[in-house]
Amino acid sequence: MIESIRNFVQLTPSIGTAGQPSTDQFQAISEAGYQQVINLAMPDHPDSIDNEGQPVTNLNMSYYHIPVPFASPRVKHVREFCALMKSLEGNRIFVHCVILETAVGSRKYAHQGPIAAFKQ
């Protein structure tokens, strides 16, 4: 069940976010109708999944990875995320990081316009 994923939040009818799903939990994400998965976690985090894109694409979902350093996100990260979200409008999108804060924060800034709070 998708609700069992750490810190899962349904932000809008088409956008869900959570902490790091397990490899098996991607099945629940697919069954919930998500078509796109955006991973904001750093690949060297101990909880990240090596080759995460493979199980995601094996379930016929598209996979995108924008590694965002938790302690110091930059404007470029937010811009890349915003552009990707815009390009995926009309799809069900699952956004995750390792815990949750990065995913929710990036989603929040995607709709607030100015991103001056982030370091250049």
Image (spheres, helix red, strand yellow):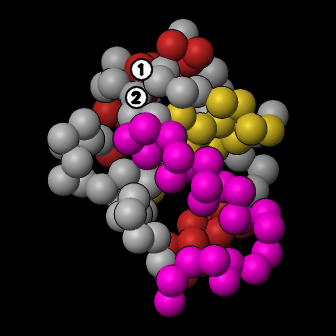
Is 42 in front, or is 92?
42
Locate residue 95, reporting x and y percent.
55, 45
Q: Are marks 2 and 1 in contact (CB under 8 Å)?
A: yes
Identify residue for label 2: 21
> Eyeballing the image, is 25 above or below 42?
above
Which residue is drawn at the image coordinates 25% and 36% (left, top)?
A: 47
- Write the start and end of the magenta stretch as one range: 97-120
How crowded pointer 1 is (Cα within 10 Å; few <14, some 14-19, many 20+) is rated as: some
Check disc 2 and report its element: helix, strand or loop.
loop
- Pick the quarter of the image with the N terminus: top right
Q: Which residue is mark 1?
A: 25
Q: Nearer the viewer, residue 46 or 65?
A: 46
- The correct choice, above or below, for 42 with respect to 47 in the image is below
Q: Is residue 15 visible?
A: yes
On screen, 10 above or below 81?
A: above
Percent of width and height locating residue 45: 22, 48
In the drawing, does residue 90 fall left or right of residue 46? right
Q: CA distance from mark 2 to mark 1?
A: 6 Å
Residue 80 numbered tag: none
- Which element is circle 1 on? helix
Q: Residue at image x 71%, y 31%? A: 10
The residue positioned 65% from the left and 36% from the top of the image is 16
Whether residue 92 appears in this view of the structure is no
Q: Residue 108 in magenta?
A: yes
- Amino acid bearing label 2: Pro
